[in-house]
Each structure stands twice: as C-alpha cells, then as structure tokens.
Amino acid sequence: MNLPRVAVYGGSFDPITRGHLDIVERGAKIFDQVIVAVLVNLRKEPLFTVEERMDFIAQATSHLQNVTVDHFPGLLVDYMKEKNAGFIIRGLRAVSDFESELQLASMNRELDHEAETIFIPTHHEYSYLSSSIIKEIARHRGDVSRFVPAAVHAALLVKYADDSQDLC
C-alpha cells in the first residue's frame, strides 16, 4: 500500500492572497493532502494574528477536501517530520523568487534528506501580488478586493479604518 503524499505549504500568509490560493488549489490537485501551515515568527509583528490568518485560510480553502490549516514555530523540516509530510510546496512569482527559494530548498534538503521541494509557478495574473503590497495598498485606502478573499478584504477595511495618521 502506498503512503499518502503529504505536502506542506508554509508561510506567513499575512494576509493570504489569491496568488497563495492559486498555489494551494494547484497543489491540492497533485498531492493527497496539503497542509497550509502558518509560520509563527516571534521576531515579526504581523498585521493579523495566527488565529485570524488560519481562519482566513480555512474559509478560503473550505471547498478543497484534502487541504487542512495549521501553524508551527521553528523549522519547517521539523514540522514536516511531525506531520509525516515528504514535500514542501513553494510558489514562484518571478525569476527573482527562484534564487532565494532555491537556497531555502537546498538548506531544507540538507537538514532533512527526505524533504522534497516542489516549485509551482504562480498564474501570471497573480505574479505581482504579495502580502506586503496588499497591506500597503489597503493602508492607503486602495481597493484590494480582487486580490484577496472576501473575509480578508473586510478585515483589512476594519484594520485600516482608523489609521488616518499614517496617511499624512
């Protein structure tokens, strides 16, 4: 009997974008199970809590039966061992992403010789999206509704509703 092919798509997802969701949906077609795992990085101050980010992801992926949402601190390869996952999913937006992603993949492979990284190029209509860009546009009251799930858009409107001092 073959073991299920389990992949982890890790990231900060602060917030999740339609580009991220494109990668999740395509990964779900390849693997038996995809775990979208929010990295808990205590050195960063995210806009949304881990719980909020997990909820956004769960809502946006609820139509995918083989996708689960979780979070982890520490090293991705340690988390993968805990979940019996053999694959890492990474999205590539542009050639510039490839160099840093290749370094990460090589290091993960060095830390765990069983870890395989699968690169999925983002659909061209999302190739310019990043969570940082989304937050910057939303902070300046730009319309990001077509770039993020509805729940994220609503939350961004609330987060930046009383943030007028930053706009001066």
Image (cartoon, rainbow, N blue to C red):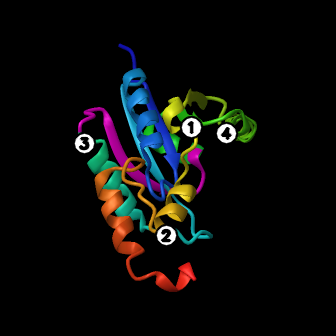
Left or right side of 46 for 21: left
Q: Position of residue 74 (x, y in %)?
A: 58, 57
Q: Residue placed at 47% from the left, 83% from the top?
A: 164
Quarter residue 121 falls in: top right
Name the residue type under label 1: Ser
Q: Could you classify mark 3 by the number of other residues whose Cα lies within 10 Å: few (under 14), some (14-19), or many (20 or more)?
A: few
Q: Earlier in the sequence, mark 4 or mark 3?
A: 3
Q: Residue at x 42, y 63 (%)?
A: 50
Residue identified by numbered label 1 = 127
Whether pointer 4 and pointer 3 mark residues with C-beta atoms closer than 8 Å, the reply is no
Q: Earlier in the sequence, mark 2 or mark 3?
A: 3
Q: From the viewer's side, name the closer residue of 92 and 114.
A: 92
Residues at marks 1 and 4 touching, judged by CB atoms closer than 8 Å = no
Q: What residue is shown with label 4?
A: 108
Look at label 2 and name its amino acid: Arg
Disc 4 vs disc 2: which is toward the camera? 2
Q: Name the element at disc 2.
A: helix
**Which is in the foreground here, disc 3 or disc 1?**
1
Tell us which disc is closer to us: 4 or 3.
Answer: 3
Characterize the local packing of mark 4: few (<14), some (14-19) or many (20 or more) Cα atoms within 10 angstroms: many
User: Which badge, 4 or 2, is on the more N-terminal residue?
Assistant: 4
Tell me the residue that label 3 is attached to. 62
Q: Nearer the viewer, residue 10 or 158?
A: 158
Residue at 39 percent across and 66 percent down: it is 156
Q: Answer with mark 3 or mark 1, whichever residue precedes in sequence.
A: 3
Q: Is residue 72 shown above or below 85?
A: below
The amino acid type of the residue labelled 3 equals Ser
